[in-house]
Protein backbone atom coordinates (compact mmCIF):
# COMPACT_ATOMS: atom_id res chain seq x y z
CA UNK A 1 0.00 0.00 0.00
CA UNK A 2 1.19 3.53 -0.76
CA UNK A 3 1.56 5.99 2.10
CA UNK A 4 -0.99 8.80 2.06
CA UNK A 5 1.65 11.53 1.79
CA UNK A 6 3.97 9.93 -0.75
CA UNK A 7 4.29 11.50 -4.20
CA UNK A 8 2.76 8.49 -5.99
CA UNK A 9 -0.26 8.61 -3.65
CA UNK A 10 -0.68 12.36 -4.17
CA UNK A 11 -0.48 11.98 -7.93
CA UNK A 12 -3.02 9.17 -7.81
CA UNK A 13 -5.42 11.28 -5.75
CA UNK A 14 -4.96 14.25 -8.08
CA UNK A 15 -5.55 12.34 -11.32
CA UNK A 16 -8.51 10.43 -9.86
CA UNK A 17 -10.16 13.38 -8.07
CA UNK A 18 -13.50 15.03 -8.67
CA UNK A 19 -11.87 18.44 -9.12
CA UNK A 20 -9.90 17.30 -12.17
CA UNK A 21 -12.99 15.65 -13.68
CA UNK A 22 -15.08 18.82 -13.31
CA UNK A 23 -12.25 20.97 -14.71
CA UNK A 24 -11.88 18.74 -17.77
CA UNK A 25 -15.60 18.76 -18.50
CA UNK A 26 -15.77 22.55 -18.17
CA UNK A 27 -12.78 22.92 -20.51
CA UNK A 28 -14.40 20.63 -23.08
CA UNK A 29 -17.56 22.73 -22.89
CA UNK A 30 -15.60 25.96 -23.42
CA UNK A 31 -13.52 24.51 -26.27
CA UNK A 32 -16.63 23.19 -28.03
CA UNK A 33 -18.33 26.56 -27.66
CA UNK A 34 -15.35 28.56 -28.95
CA UNK A 35 -14.67 26.20 -31.87
CA UNK A 36 -18.33 26.42 -32.90
CA UNK A 37 -18.09 30.22 -32.94
CA UNK A 38 -14.91 30.09 -35.06
CA UNK A 39 -16.20 27.57 -37.59
CA UNK A 40 -18.23 29.94 -39.86
CA UNK A 41 -15.20 32.17 -40.48
CA UNK A 42 -12.39 29.61 -40.67
CA UNK A 43 -14.10 26.44 -41.88
CA UNK A 44 -14.70 23.06 -40.28
CA UNK A 45 -11.39 21.46 -41.29
CA UNK A 46 -9.22 24.33 -40.00
CA UNK A 47 -11.10 24.55 -36.69
CA UNK A 48 -10.95 20.80 -36.13
CA UNK A 49 -7.22 20.86 -36.74
CA UNK A 50 -6.63 23.78 -34.36
CA UNK A 51 -8.86 22.59 -31.51
CA UNK A 52 -9.11 18.80 -31.74
CA UNK A 53 -6.01 17.44 -33.46
CA UNK A 54 -3.70 15.19 -31.45
CA UNK A 55 -0.79 17.54 -32.16
CA UNK A 56 -2.70 20.59 -30.91
CA UNK A 57 -1.42 20.64 -27.34
CA UNK A 58 -2.83 24.12 -26.84
CA UNK A 59 -5.06 26.52 -28.74
CA UNK A 60 -5.41 30.30 -28.73
CA UNK A 61 -9.00 31.31 -29.61
CA UNK A 62 -9.22 33.76 -32.50
CA UNK A 63 -12.54 35.62 -32.38
CA UNK A 64 -13.42 39.25 -33.19
CA UNK A 65 -14.39 40.10 -29.60
CA UNK A 66 -10.97 38.90 -28.38
CA UNK A 67 -9.27 41.91 -30.03
CA UNK A 68 -8.80 45.11 -28.06
CA UNK A 69 -11.00 48.00 -29.25
CA UNK A 70 -9.68 51.34 -30.46
CA UNK A 71 -9.87 53.30 -27.21
CA UNK A 72 -7.67 56.28 -26.35
CA UNK A 73 -6.37 54.85 -23.09
CA UNK A 74 -5.19 51.70 -24.87
CA UNK A 75 -2.69 53.73 -26.88
CA UNK A 76 -0.74 51.32 -29.10
CA UNK A 77 -2.61 48.22 -27.92
CA UNK A 78 -5.68 48.81 -30.09
CA UNK A 79 -6.33 45.92 -32.46
CA UNK A 80 -4.06 43.53 -30.57
CA UNK A 81 -5.37 40.04 -29.87
CA UNK A 82 -6.08 39.02 -26.29
CA UNK A 83 -3.99 35.88 -25.75
CA UNK A 84 -5.93 33.20 -23.87
CA UNK A 85 -4.10 29.86 -24.25
CA UNK A 86 -6.23 26.81 -23.59
CA UNK A 87 -5.29 23.12 -23.65
CA UNK A 88 -6.32 21.29 -26.81
CA UNK A 89 -9.47 19.16 -26.69
CA UNK A 90 -7.52 15.97 -27.48
CA UNK A 91 -5.24 16.52 -24.45
CA UNK A 92 -8.19 17.36 -22.18
CA UNK A 93 -10.05 14.23 -23.33
CA UNK A 94 -6.97 12.08 -22.66
CA UNK A 95 -6.68 13.48 -19.11
CA UNK A 96 -10.40 12.91 -18.54
CA UNK A 97 -10.03 9.33 -19.80
CA UNK A 98 -7.26 8.68 -17.22
CA UNK A 99 -9.32 10.38 -14.51
CA UNK A 100 -12.37 8.20 -15.18
CA UNK A 101 -10.29 5.02 -15.26
CA UNK A 102 -8.54 5.83 -11.98
CA UNK A 103 -11.37 7.51 -10.10
CA UNK A 104 -14.51 6.06 -11.62
CA UNK A 105 -13.39 2.44 -11.93
CA UNK A 106 -10.28 1.76 -9.79
CA UNK A 107 -10.64 4.15 -6.83
CA UNK A 108 -14.41 3.98 -6.42
CA UNK A 109 -15.79 1.83 -3.61
CA UNK A 110 -16.76 -1.57 -4.92
CA UNK A 111 -19.99 -3.28 -3.99
CA UNK A 112 -23.58 -3.73 -5.08
CA UNK A 113 -24.55 -0.32 -3.77
CA UNK A 114 -22.28 1.37 -6.32
CA UNK A 115 -22.76 -1.01 -9.26
CA UNK A 116 -24.89 1.53 -11.17
CA UNK A 117 -22.27 4.28 -10.78
CA UNK A 118 -19.49 1.93 -11.87
CA UNK A 119 -21.47 0.96 -14.98
CA UNK A 120 -22.05 4.64 -15.84
CA UNK A 121 -18.37 5.48 -15.43
CA UNK A 122 -17.41 2.52 -17.60
CA UNK A 123 -19.75 3.76 -20.33
CA UNK A 124 -18.12 7.22 -20.21
CA UNK A 125 -14.68 5.62 -20.56
CA UNK A 126 -15.88 3.63 -23.58
CA UNK A 127 -17.39 6.83 -25.06
CA UNK A 128 -14.03 8.62 -24.86
CA UNK A 129 -12.26 5.56 -26.29
CA UNK A 130 -14.74 5.55 -29.18
CA UNK A 131 -13.78 9.18 -29.86
CA UNK A 132 -10.10 8.20 -29.96
CA UNK A 133 -10.78 5.36 -32.41
CA UNK A 134 -12.85 7.66 -34.63
CA UNK A 135 -10.15 10.35 -34.58
CA UNK A 136 -7.40 7.88 -35.38
CA UNK A 137 -9.01 5.49 -37.84
CA UNK A 138 -12.12 7.07 -39.38
CA UNK A 139 -12.10 8.14 -43.01
CA UNK A 140 -14.38 10.59 -44.78
CA UNK A 141 -15.08 11.28 -48.42
CA UNK A 142 -17.81 12.15 -50.88
CA UNK A 143 -19.42 10.22 -53.74
CA UNK A 144 -21.12 12.09 -56.58
CA UNK A 145 -23.65 10.14 -58.65
CA UNK A 146 -25.81 11.28 -61.56
CA UNK A 147 -29.37 10.01 -61.77
CA UNK A 148 -29.56 6.56 -63.43
CA UNK A 149 -25.79 6.06 -63.08
CA UNK A 150 -23.66 3.84 -60.85
CA UNK A 151 -20.63 4.70 -58.70
CA UNK A 152 -18.35 2.52 -56.59
CA UNK A 153 -15.75 4.97 -55.26
CA UNK A 154 -15.45 8.05 -53.07
CA UNK A 155 -13.02 10.96 -53.05
CA UNK A 156 -11.43 12.59 -50.04
CA UNK A 157 -12.58 16.07 -49.07
CA UNK A 158 -9.07 17.41 -48.64
CA UNK A 159 -6.30 14.80 -49.11
CA UNK A 160 -4.52 14.71 -52.48
CA UNK A 161 -2.54 11.92 -54.11
CA UNK A 162 -0.31 11.81 -57.19
CA UNK A 163 -1.11 9.12 -59.75
CA UNK A 164 1.55 7.95 -62.21
CA UNK A 165 0.74 5.59 -65.05
CA UNK A 166 2.09 4.56 -68.44
CA UNK A 167 0.14 5.35 -71.61
CA UNK A 168 -0.04 2.32 -73.90
CA UNK A 169 -1.98 2.55 -77.18
CA UNK A 170 -3.65 5.71 -75.92
CA UNK A 171 -4.92 4.06 -72.73
CA UNK A 172 -3.78 4.37 -69.12
CA UNK A 173 -2.32 1.36 -67.36
CA UNK A 174 -2.88 0.65 -63.66
CA UNK A 175 -1.60 3.70 -61.77
CA UNK A 176 1.17 3.93 -59.21
CA UNK A 177 -0.16 6.11 -56.40
CA UNK A 178 1.80 8.43 -54.11
CA UNK A 179 -0.25 8.22 -50.87
CA UNK A 180 -1.74 11.30 -49.26
CA UNK A 181 0.04 10.95 -45.91
CA UNK A 182 3.53 12.16 -46.97
CA UNK A 183 2.04 14.94 -49.12
CA UNK A 184 -0.35 16.65 -46.72
CA UNK A 185 2.46 17.50 -44.30
CA UNK A 186 4.50 19.35 -46.93
CA UNK A 187 5.00 23.10 -47.12
CA UNK A 188 6.27 25.36 -49.91
CA UNK A 189 9.88 24.99 -48.74
CA UNK A 190 9.78 21.18 -48.36
CA UNK A 191 10.67 18.44 -50.82
CA UNK A 192 9.60 14.81 -50.83
CA UNK A 193 11.48 12.11 -52.74
CA UNK A 194 9.23 9.25 -53.94
CA UNK A 195 10.86 6.02 -55.10
CA UNK A 196 9.35 3.90 -57.89
CA UNK A 197 11.38 0.67 -58.04
CA UNK A 198 9.25 -0.74 -60.87
CA UNK A 199 9.47 2.40 -63.01
CA UNK A 200 12.55 3.80 -64.81
CA UNK A 201 12.44 6.95 -62.68
CA UNK A 202 11.71 8.47 -59.28
CA UNK A 203 10.02 11.80 -58.60
CA UNK A 204 10.71 14.65 -56.21
CA UNK A 205 7.73 16.73 -55.04
CA UNK A 206 8.42 20.37 -54.22
CA UNK A 207 6.68 23.73 -53.60
CA UNK A 208 3.54 22.07 -52.26
CA UNK A 209 0.72 24.63 -52.00
CA UNK A 210 -2.43 23.81 -50.08
CA UNK A 211 -4.37 26.43 -52.04
CA UNK A 212 -3.02 27.82 -55.30
CA UNK A 213 -3.76 29.27 -58.69
CA UNK A 214 -2.08 28.97 -62.08
CA UNK A 215 -0.91 32.18 -63.75
CA UNK A 216 0.92 32.92 -66.98
CA UNK A 217 4.56 33.94 -66.72
CA UNK A 218 7.23 34.57 -69.33
CA UNK A 219 10.19 34.83 -66.95
CA UNK A 220 12.48 32.17 -68.43
CA UNK A 221 14.91 32.49 -65.53
CA UNK A 222 12.28 31.60 -62.94
CA UNK A 223 12.70 27.87 -62.10
CA UNK A 224 8.99 27.68 -61.18
CA UNK A 225 7.83 28.62 -64.68
CA UNK A 226 6.90 25.53 -66.70
CA UNK A 227 5.68 25.95 -70.29
CA UNK A 228 4.79 29.58 -69.59
CA UNK A 229 2.79 28.76 -66.46
CA UNK A 230 3.55 29.26 -62.79
CA UNK A 231 1.88 28.27 -59.54
CA UNK A 232 0.89 31.12 -57.26
CA UNK A 233 0.10 30.40 -53.63
CA UNK A 234 -3.18 31.93 -52.44
CA UNK A 235 -4.87 32.35 -49.09
CA UNK A 236 -6.59 29.23 -47.78
CA UNK A 237 -10.31 29.00 -48.51
CA UNK A 238 -12.92 29.06 -45.76
CA UNK A 239 -13.66 25.36 -46.31
CA UNK A 240 -10.96 22.81 -47.07
CA UNK A 241 -12.98 21.44 -49.98
CA UNK A 242 -12.55 24.75 -51.82
CA UNK A 243 -8.77 24.64 -51.60
CA UNK A 244 -7.01 23.86 -54.88
CA UNK A 245 -3.69 22.14 -54.20
CA UNK A 246 -0.75 22.46 -56.55
CA UNK A 247 2.88 21.39 -56.69
CA UNK A 248 5.88 20.74 -58.91
CA UNK A 249 7.46 17.37 -59.55
CA UNK A 250 10.94 16.67 -60.88
CA UNK A 251 11.26 13.40 -62.77
CA UNK A 252 14.59 11.77 -61.89
CA UNK A 253 15.43 8.95 -64.37
CA UNK A 254 17.33 5.97 -62.98
CA UNK A 255 19.50 6.23 -66.08
CA UNK A 256 21.83 9.08 -65.20
CA UNK A 257 22.26 9.83 -68.90
CA UNK A 258 18.89 11.55 -69.04
CA UNK A 259 18.33 14.91 -67.38
CA UNK A 260 15.48 15.61 -64.99
CA UNK A 261 12.16 16.97 -66.21
CA UNK A 262 10.03 19.42 -64.24
CA UNK A 263 6.21 19.31 -64.39
CA UNK A 264 3.52 21.50 -62.85
CA UNK A 265 0.53 19.68 -61.31
CA UNK A 266 -2.69 21.47 -60.37
CA UNK A 267 -5.52 19.74 -58.51
CA UNK A 268 -8.59 21.26 -60.25
CA UNK A 269 -7.29 20.23 -63.69
CA UNK A 270 -8.32 16.59 -64.25
CA UNK A 271 -6.28 16.13 -67.42
CA UNK A 272 -2.93 14.42 -66.81
CA UNK A 273 0.43 16.00 -67.59
CA UNK A 274 2.60 13.72 -69.74
CA UNK A 275 6.33 13.20 -70.13
CA UNK A 276 8.45 10.80 -72.18
CA UNK A 277 11.05 8.76 -70.30
CA UNK A 278 13.15 6.10 -72.03
CA UNK A 279 10.90 6.30 -75.07
CA UNK A 280 7.71 5.61 -73.10
CA UNK A 281 4.91 8.07 -72.31
CA UNK A 282 3.87 8.50 -68.68
CA UNK A 283 0.95 10.49 -67.28
CA UNK A 284 1.04 12.39 -63.97
CA UNK A 285 -2.10 13.63 -62.21
CA UNK A 286 -2.75 15.40 -58.91
CA UNK A 287 -6.16 14.22 -57.70
CA UNK A 288 -8.09 14.04 -54.46
CA UNK A 289 -7.51 10.66 -52.85
CA UNK A 290 -9.80 7.99 -54.29
CA UNK A 291 -10.89 4.96 -52.28
CA UNK A 292 -13.04 2.13 -53.63
CA UNK A 293 -16.24 0.99 -51.94
CA UNK A 294 -17.17 -2.68 -51.31
CA UNK A 295 -20.51 -1.97 -53.00
CA UNK A 296 -22.05 0.00 -55.86
CA UNK A 297 -24.63 2.77 -55.64
CA UNK A 298 -27.23 3.15 -58.39
CA UNK A 299 -29.04 6.49 -58.11
CA UNK A 300 -32.65 5.70 -59.05
CA UNK A 301 -34.10 9.12 -58.25
CA UNK A 302 -32.68 12.39 -56.92
CA UNK A 303 -35.27 14.84 -55.61
CA UNK A 304 -34.68 18.35 -54.31
CA UNK A 305 -35.80 21.97 -54.23
CA UNK A 306 -34.00 25.31 -54.09
CA UNK A 307 -34.88 28.26 -51.90
CA UNK A 308 -36.73 30.76 -54.13
CA UNK A 309 -34.33 32.93 -56.12
CA UNK A 310 -31.21 31.07 -54.92
CA UNK A 311 -29.07 28.06 -55.78
CA UNK A 312 -29.11 26.83 -52.18
CA UNK A 313 -31.08 23.57 -51.75
CA UNK A 314 -33.89 23.73 -49.21
CA UNK A 315 -34.68 20.01 -49.39
CA UNK A 316 -33.15 16.96 -51.04
CA UNK A 317 -33.35 13.19 -50.84
CA UNK A 318 -32.22 10.20 -52.91
CA UNK A 319 -33.65 6.82 -53.77
CA UNK A 320 -30.83 4.38 -54.43
CA UNK A 321 -30.15 0.72 -55.10
CA UNK A 322 -27.21 -0.77 -53.24
CA UNK A 323 -25.52 -3.51 -55.26
CA UNK A 324 -23.30 -5.82 -53.21
CA UNK A 325 -22.53 -9.55 -53.03
CA UNK A 326 -24.61 -10.18 -56.16
CA UNK A 327 -27.71 -8.81 -54.45
CA UNK A 328 -29.63 -5.56 -54.67
CA UNK A 329 -31.46 -3.61 -51.99
CA UNK A 330 -33.30 -0.31 -52.26
CA UNK A 331 -32.91 2.58 -49.79
CA UNK A 332 -34.16 6.12 -49.37
CA UNK A 333 -31.44 8.41 -48.03
CA UNK A 334 -32.34 11.78 -46.56
CA UNK A 335 -31.53 13.99 -43.58
CA UNK A 336 -30.82 11.88 -40.47
CA UNK A 337 -31.65 8.69 -42.39
CA UNK A 338 -28.34 7.33 -43.74
CA UNK A 339 -27.55 3.95 -45.24
CA UNK A 340 -25.14 1.68 -43.34
CA UNK A 341 -23.29 -1.26 -44.81
CA UNK A 342 -20.07 -3.13 -43.95
CA UNK A 343 -18.75 -0.36 -41.70
CA UNK A 344 -19.59 2.44 -44.16
CA UNK A 345 -22.27 5.09 -43.63
CA UNK A 346 -23.76 7.11 -46.51
CA UNK A 347 -25.37 10.46 -45.71
CA UNK A 348 -27.23 12.74 -48.09
CA UNK A 349 -24.88 15.74 -48.27
CA UNK A 350 -25.29 17.52 -51.64
CA UNK A 351 -27.83 17.93 -54.39
CA UNK A 352 -27.75 19.69 -57.74
CA UNK A 353 -30.63 20.01 -60.16
CA UNK A 354 -29.01 22.44 -62.59
CA UNK A 355 -27.83 19.84 -65.08
CA UNK A 356 -29.88 17.77 -67.48
CA UNK A 357 -29.91 14.99 -64.90
CA UNK A 358 -30.01 15.64 -61.16
CA UNK A 359 -26.93 14.75 -59.12
CA UNK A 360 -26.63 13.62 -55.52
CA UNK A 361 -23.57 13.89 -53.33
CA UNK A 362 -23.24 11.30 -50.57
CA UNK A 363 -20.91 11.89 -47.64
CA UNK A 364 -19.27 8.54 -46.91
CA UNK A 365 -17.80 7.82 -43.51
CA UNK A 366 -15.91 4.69 -42.51
CA UNK A 367 -15.69 4.73 -38.74
CA UNK A 368 -14.94 1.52 -36.81
CA UNK A 369 -16.55 3.04 -33.70
CA UNK A 370 -19.63 4.40 -35.46
CA UNK A 371 -22.15 2.72 -33.16
CA UNK A 372 -20.08 2.77 -29.96
CA UNK A 373 -21.38 6.14 -28.69
CA UNK A 374 -24.98 4.96 -29.02
CA UNK A 375 -24.33 1.78 -27.07
CA UNK A 376 -22.25 3.69 -24.49
CA UNK A 377 -25.21 5.99 -23.85
CA UNK A 378 -27.52 2.98 -23.51
CA UNK A 379 -25.14 1.46 -20.94
CA UNK A 380 -24.92 4.79 -19.13
CA UNK A 381 -28.72 4.99 -18.97
CA UNK A 382 -28.81 1.45 -17.59
CA UNK A 383 -26.24 2.34 -14.92
CA UNK A 384 -28.12 5.47 -13.88
CA UNK A 385 -31.43 3.57 -13.86
CA UNK A 386 -29.92 0.93 -11.56
CA UNK A 387 -28.32 3.54 -9.30
CA UNK A 388 -31.40 5.75 -8.88
CA UNK A 389 -33.65 2.69 -8.72
CA UNK A 390 -31.64 1.34 -5.80
CA UNK A 391 -31.70 4.77 -4.13
CA UNK A 392 -35.46 5.02 -4.62
CA UNK A 393 -35.94 1.49 -3.32
CA UNK A 394 -33.84 2.27 -0.27
CA UNK A 395 -35.75 5.48 0.39
CA UNK A 396 -39.11 3.73 0.11
CA UNK A 397 -37.91 0.91 2.37
CA UNK A 398 -36.55 3.35 4.95
CA UNK A 399 -39.76 5.42 4.86
CA UNK A 400 -41.82 2.27 5.29
CA UNK A 401 -39.80 1.19 8.33
CA UNK A 402 -40.10 4.67 9.82
CA UNK A 403 -43.87 4.68 9.31
CA UNK A 404 -44.22 1.24 10.90
CA UNK A 405 -42.08 2.35 13.83
CA UNK A 406 -44.15 5.50 14.28
CA UNK A 407 -47.38 3.49 14.07
CA UNK A 408 -46.07 1.02 16.66
CA UNK A 409 -45.08 3.83 19.02
CA UNK A 410 -48.53 5.43 18.67
CA UNK A 411 -50.22 2.12 19.42
CA UNK A 412 -48.14 1.62 22.58
CA UNK A 413 -48.90 5.17 23.71
CA UNK A 414 -52.63 4.59 23.27
CA UNK A 415 -52.47 1.47 25.45
Image (cartoon, rainbow, N blue to C red):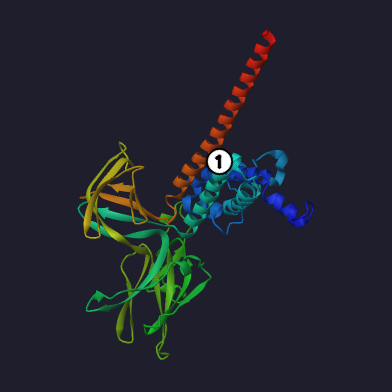
Q: Residue at x 37, y 85 (%)?
A: 200
Q: Quadrant of the N terminus?
A: bottom right
Q: Quadrant of the C terminus?
A: top right
Reply above or below: 177 against 357.
below
Q: Which of the 4 image quarters holds residue 412?
A: top right
The answer to whether any part of residue 64 appears in the image is no
Image mark count? 1
What percent of the width, then of the height, locates residue 326? 21, 60
Give the residue pinned by disc 1: 116
What percent of the width, then of the height, locates residue 267? 38, 64
Q: Is residue 295 left or right of residue 58?
A: left
Reply above or below: 32 against 8.
above
Q: Residue furthest front?
A: 415
What percent of the width, then of the height, locates residue 49? 52, 55
Comparing 264 with 304, the one in front is: 304
Q: Residue furthest bottom?
A: 257
Q: Is residue 91 left or right of residue 184?
A: right
Q: Residues within 10 Å of mark 1 (few under 14, many from 20)?
A: many
Q: Residue at x 49, y 74 (%)?
A: 192
Q: Residue furthest top?
A: 414
Q: Residue at x 67, y 15 (%)?
A: 409
Comparing 399 with 177, the one in front is: 399
Reply above or below: 60 against 210.
above
Q: Secondary structure at mark 1?
A: helix
What percent of the width, then of the height, locates residue 401? 62, 23
Q: Which of the 4 image quarters holds residue 69?
A: top right
The answer to whether any part of residue 280 appears in the image is yes
Comparing 349 with 193, the one in front is: 349
Amino acid sequence: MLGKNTWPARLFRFFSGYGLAVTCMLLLFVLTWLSTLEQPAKGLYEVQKRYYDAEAWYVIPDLPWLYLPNLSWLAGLAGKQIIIPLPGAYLVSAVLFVNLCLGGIIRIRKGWKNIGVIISHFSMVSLLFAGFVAHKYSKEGIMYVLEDEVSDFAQSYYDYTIEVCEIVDGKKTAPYVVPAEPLKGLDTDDTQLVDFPKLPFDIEVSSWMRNSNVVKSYDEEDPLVVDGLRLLQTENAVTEEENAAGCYIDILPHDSGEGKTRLLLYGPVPDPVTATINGKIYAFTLVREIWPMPFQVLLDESVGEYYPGTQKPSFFMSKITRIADKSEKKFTIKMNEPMRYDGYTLYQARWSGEMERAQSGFAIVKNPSDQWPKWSLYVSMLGLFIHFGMKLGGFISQSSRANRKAASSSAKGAV
